[in-house]
Structure formats: structure tokens, C-alpha cells
């Protein structure tokens, strides 16, 4: 318990130290304050931005796009990954192709999404889906392959149906790996949606960040970065908490 507390305290101390260094660099002029506003000014600007109805509306827009893309990519990717892993021949054919596709920077396809879907909700959701699905497929394939053959043999020898095998054997064995995959998938998903908003959009927090950057509004720009980082960290910690609650399934 004391060790866990010490680790958490060290993490907090590191974050506080980074903000302190940021503050000192700006306040002392080591870094031009116009390029790097102080941490205190940035946090004050963040508080001001969150009180604006337009910023809150953009956050809701981005959240809806991220949630929709994630809700589509995870089950579709999981189903494809499961089917690939269950067929040895198909897995041997498809897995190298998946790795090739995953290695290609997804941002180069963004103009195609704009041409096909236009500038709007479907374009950003589609690109978020595209940015996420490959990591979900690959993670699910790995998770299925991690299921012990002995567990499947015992379940089938007792006459378990495919549905019972899926929920009683596959899911408990795969869940820890899938939860880890969810954390990584959300990073790709959020990055894809924000990138789509920054590239071509009329709303969303990514559009706001791009506008602040183009107008050299550094306080607002850094505040937006801190805002997105806080949201990403909050989701990451939520999944980590769920993962610890399911840790007994690792055994």
C-alpha cells in the first residue's frame, strides 16, 4: 500500500515539476512568452474557454464524433479479428496484409474521406473509424490466439455451445488484452477525429485548435492542448480502473 502511494506521489510530483519548469521558462524569458505563455496563464485561459458556450458546443461535437467512431470500430474490428484468428489459413493470408495496412500513415487518406463524405460529421467519424479499426483487428486476433487450447478442449468436451464457449471461455480470457487494446484504440480514434477536424471542419475542438494556431493565439492553443490531453488521460485511467477490476480473469 505504501509502495503504491509512493508511486502515485512520485507521478504527481513529476507533473507538478513539469508545470513549474514551464512556468519558470516563460516567466524568466528563457523562452519567449509570446511563443510559450506561462502555465498559470494557460490554465487561466483554459478556465475561461470552458465557460464559453461555443467551446462547450465544440467539445460536445468532438465527443459525439469520437464516441460514434469508437462504437462502430470496436465491434466491427473485434468481429473481423475473431474470424481471422479462428481460421488458420485466413489468418496466415490476412495478418501480413493487416500489418502492411497498419504501417501506412492514415493521414494520407484524409483527403479521400473529404472527397467521398464531404466536410461534416460523416467524414470525421469515417476517418476516426478508419484510424481505429486496424489496431482493434490486430489486438483481437492476438487476444483470441492467447486463449489456452486446454480451456477450449474442456469446454467442448462438456458439450458447451458456441455461444457458451464465447462467453465462458473466450471473453474472460480475452478481456484483459482487449481492455489494453481499447486504451490504445482510443488514442488512434481521438487522434483521427481531431486531425480530421483540424484539416477540414466547421466545428469541433480540433477546428478551434487549428483556428487558434493560425491566428497565433498561443494561450488558447496551449489551453486546447491541455484540454485534449486531460480528456485522453481521463479515459485512459478509466479503462485502467476497469482493467484492475477484471484482473482476476488474468489467472
Image (cartoon, rainbow, N blue to C red):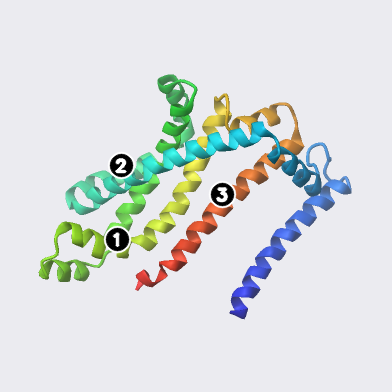
| Contact (Cβ within 8 Å) of mark 2 with mark 1 | no
Circle 2 Cα neighbour tier, 10 Å, few/some/many (<14 / 14–19 / ≥20): few
Q: CA distance from mark 2 to mark 1?
A: 26 Å
Instruction: Give percent across and percent down for residue 125.
Output: 44, 33
Name the mark on residue 171: 1
| 212 sits left or right of 229 in the view | right
Circle 1 Cα neighbour tier, 10 Å, few/some/many (<14 / 14–19 / ≥20): some
Residue found at x 60% / y 30%: 207
From what the image shows, is residue 114 above or below residue 17? above
| 176 sits left or right of 87 in the view | right
2 vs 1, front mark: 1
Instruction: Give percent across and percent down for residue 5.
Output: 63, 74
Instruction: Give percent across and percent down for residue 251.
Output: 34, 74
Whether residue 205 can be seen here:
no
Q: Secondary structure beneath disc 3?
A: helix
| Contact (Cβ within 8 Å) of mark 3 with mark 2 | no
From what the image shows, is residue 205 above or below residue 98? above
Residue receiving disc 3: 232
Residue receiving disc 2: 97
Q: CA distance from mark 3 to mark 1?
A: 26 Å
The disc, 3 or 1, on the residue closer to the chain's N-terminal end is 1
Amino acid at each position: 500500500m505504501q509502495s503504491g502511494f509512493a508511486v502515485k506521489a512520485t507521478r504527481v510530483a513529476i507533473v507538478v515539476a513539469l508545470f513549474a519548469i514551464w512556468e519558470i521558462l516563460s516567466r524568466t524569458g528563457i523562452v519567449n512568452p509570446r511563443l510559450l505563455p506561462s502555465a498559470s496563464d494557460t490554465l487561466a485561459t483554459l478556465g475561461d474557454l470552458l465557460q464559453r458556450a461555443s467551446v462547450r458546443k465544440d467539445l460536445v461535437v468532438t465527443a459525439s464524433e469520437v464516441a460514434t467512431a469508437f462504437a462502430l470500430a470496436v465491434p466491427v474490428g473485434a468481429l473481423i479479428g475473431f474470424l481471422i484468428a479462428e481460421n488458420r489459413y485466413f489468418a496466415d493470408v490476412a495478418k501480413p496484409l493487416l500489418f502492411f495496412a497498419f504501417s501506412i500513415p492514415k493521414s494520407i487518406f484524409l483527403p479521400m474521406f473529404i472527397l467521398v463524405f464531404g466536410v461534416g460529421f460523416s467524414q470525421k467519424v469515417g476517418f476516426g473509424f478508419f484510424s481505429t479499426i486496424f489496431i482493434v483487428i490486430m489486438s483481437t486476433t492476438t487476444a483470441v490466439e492467447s486463449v489456452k487450447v486446454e480451456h477450449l478442449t474442456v469446454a467442448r468436451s462438456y458439450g458447451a455451445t458456441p455461444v457458451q464457449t464465447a462467453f465462458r471461455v473466450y471473453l474472460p480470457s480475452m478481456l484483459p488484452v482487449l481492455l489494453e487494446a481499447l486504451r490504445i484504440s482510443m488514442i488512434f480514434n481521438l487522434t483521427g477525429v481531431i486531425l480530421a477536424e483540424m484539416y477540414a471542419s466547421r466545428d469541433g475542438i480540433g477546428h478551434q485548435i487549428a483556428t487558434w494556431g493560425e491566428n497565433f493565439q498561443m494561450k488558447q492553443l496551449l489551453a486546447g492542448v491541455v484540454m485534449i490531453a486531460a480528456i485522453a488521460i481521463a479515459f485512459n485511467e478509466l479503462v485502467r480502473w476497469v482493467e484492475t477490476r477484471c484482473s482476476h480473469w488474468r489467472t
